Image (tube, grey):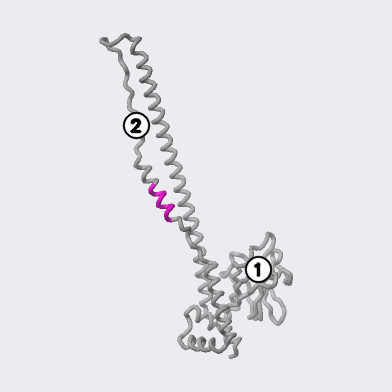
Amino acid sequence: MNTKEYISSGIIESYILGLASPEEAGILECVMKNNAEVKAAFEEAQQTLEDLATSQAVAPPADLKSKIWNKIQQEQTTEEVQPAVIRDIPTVRPQENIAPQQDIQPQSKSSWKTYAVAASVLFLVSAAGNLFWMNSQSETRSEIAKMQTEKKTQDLAMQKMNQKMDMVSNPDMQMVMLKGVEKHTDSKAMVFWDKKTKQVYLNAESLPKAPEGMQYQLWAIADGKPVSAGMYTEEKDSKIALANIPKAQAFAITLEKEGGSAVPTMENMYVMGGI
């Protein structure tokens, strides 16, 4: 077995994932000390797997826990506030042994004004309390809905990550890293080629979002000729096979009109990688 065959055998990926046997691990470590090409392939595969894991990581907002706790405390505090009760206003009745009516009339009017002002203030306080409680309840419901949406997003991301890790750990799955070409040096993608079923899967989340009316197309280079290996969509990423490819020496991705092209548009090539 030559160096290229040893690199493409999958032993490097098995070693990184901790799936290699002690004998295989010992041989690989010995080979890396004496073979610069194998060591470079090991470092490249390790970085690729780290990038794959990092791109799928979804962390909850740092302040989410404190927000929920504050909302719960506000709601409990609001429930403890008792609604204001306006007591019956006493009626002033004239008595025989008091000053003439013209003398007490101004005092009676003043009392009524005082009670009216007090009632108005209590009404405003009660209304303000009810409004605050309603707003607080609305905000709490919004926070809960936001939390549920974020959890659903995290669950989907975790599900996709688990699917990719299953593919990576599959000994029959060959990984081919596609690197950005001259115009798109920052672009990258990963092809998963099942050596038994010959089905091809694609992880292309690191590519820029395709413009409206355009779509990424995967190509397999077999005997020097490009063969369409399927059209990429986000729904298919890493979990739905794009095509069945019996043989290939390399893979590439181009940006084509939606629906694909019979031949690749070379000026729109984004990434390419040999096997």
Q: Nearer the viewer, mark 2 or mark 1?
A: 2
Element type at marker 2?
Answer: loop
Element type at marker 1?
Answer: strand
Q: Quadrant of residue 220?
A: bottom right
Residue at left 56%, top 74%? 48
Quadrant position of the N terminus in the picture: bottom right
In the displayed structure, 51 sits above or below 60; it is below
The secondary structure making up most of the magenta span is: helix
Q: Position of residue 199 (x, y in %)?
A: 60, 76
Outermost residue on the left side: it is 97
99 or 252: nearer the viewer: 99
Residue at left 40%, top 30%? 121
Q: Is residue 260 magenta?
A: no
In the displayed structure, 91 sits above or below 224; it is above
Q: Amino acid at mark 1?
A: Met
Residue 85 numbered tag? 2
In the displayed structure, 119 sits above or below 159; it is above
The residue to which callout 1 is attached is 231
Residue at left 69%, top 80%? 222
Magenta residues? 65-73
Q: Quadrant of residue 116?
A: top left
